[in-house]
């Protein structure tokens, strides 16, 4: 979907550049040029500059991915089947998502800013916590205790992030497929 207003165009351009070049290597002048926004409009919409742009891009990515996770998990009543389905769906469309530059790479952003920008590190942490909670909520609905579901939600997110990174590195969905299969086995052994 093509952004329609200047603020959205700037945010979309920033996300695209952060994804391609990284946070530190992206300048406000590059964002202005990429967005075709009038000079000065970045500070009009984002008074705190690049950090605010990055934080909003992180949050927007978080919201879009969270909605996708919720929709995907709603496909099956059983948590194990839903999570397995979700990972397989991610694998099936992961390379088309790489082409969709509306979202930043949360893993890359986290790796880049964890020691240099506490505001952005915390924004990434908040998004990951929200995603983990979606998995935990699904597990609670399937009969898991709150604390076990919370820990499993964190483990599932960690497994997905690792498998996603390996899939990109290997240019293959096999690591994602393996993660889905192994999570299925993990839950099967639980029952």
Image (cartoon, rainbow, N blue to C red):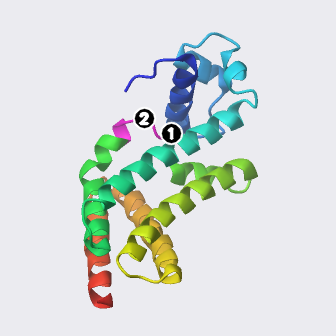
For the point 32% across and 83% down, the residue is 186
For the point 49% across and 83% down, the residue is 148
* Left or right placement of residue 161 versus residue 189 in this view: right
Q: SS at mark 1?
A: helix
- Quadrant containing the N terminus is top left
* Left or right placement of residue 154 versus residue 43 in this view: left
Q: Disc 1 to disc 2, how far (Cα)?
A: 7 Å
Residue ID for mark 2: 101
> How many neighbours does mark 2 have within 10 angstroms: few (below 14), some (14-19), or many (20 or more)?
some
Q: Read off the magenta span.
A: 98-103
Where does the image place residue 99, in percent across and percent down from the top left? Answer: 35, 36
Where does the image place residue 37, in percent across and percent down from the top left? Answer: 58, 13
Q: Is residue 134 above or below residue 41?
A: below
Q: Earlier in the sequence, mark 1 or mark 2?
A: 1
Farthest-out residue, top: 38
Q: SS at mark 2?
A: loop
Where does the image place residue 92, in percent across and percent down from the top left? Answer: 23, 52
Quadrant hosting residue 11: top right
Q: Is residue 168 above or below residue 129?
A: above
């Amino acid at each position: 979907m093509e952004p329609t207003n200047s603020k959205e165009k700037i945010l979309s351009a920033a996300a695209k550049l952060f994804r391609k070049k990284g946070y530190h290597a992206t300048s406000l002048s590059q964002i202005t040029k990429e967005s075709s926004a009038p000079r000065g409009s970045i500070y009009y919409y984002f008074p705190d500059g690049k950090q605010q742009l990055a934080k909003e891009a992180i949050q927007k990515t978080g919201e879009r991915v969270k909605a996708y996770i919720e929709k995907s998990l709603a496909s099956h009543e059983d948590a194990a089947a839903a999570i397995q389905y979700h990972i397989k769906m991610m694998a099936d469309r992961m390379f088309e998502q790489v082409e969709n530059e509306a979202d930043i790479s949360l893993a890359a952003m986290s790796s880049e800013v964890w020691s240099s920008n506490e505001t952005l590190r915390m924004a990434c942490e908040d998004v990951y916590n929200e995603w983990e909670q979606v998995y935990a909520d699904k597990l609670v609905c399937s009969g898991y205790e709150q604390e076990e579901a919370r820990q499993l939600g964190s483990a599932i997110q960690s497994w997905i992030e690792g498998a996603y990174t390996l899939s990109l590195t290997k240019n293959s969905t096999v690591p994602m497929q393996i993660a889905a299969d192994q999570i299925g086995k993990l839950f099967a052994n639980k029952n």
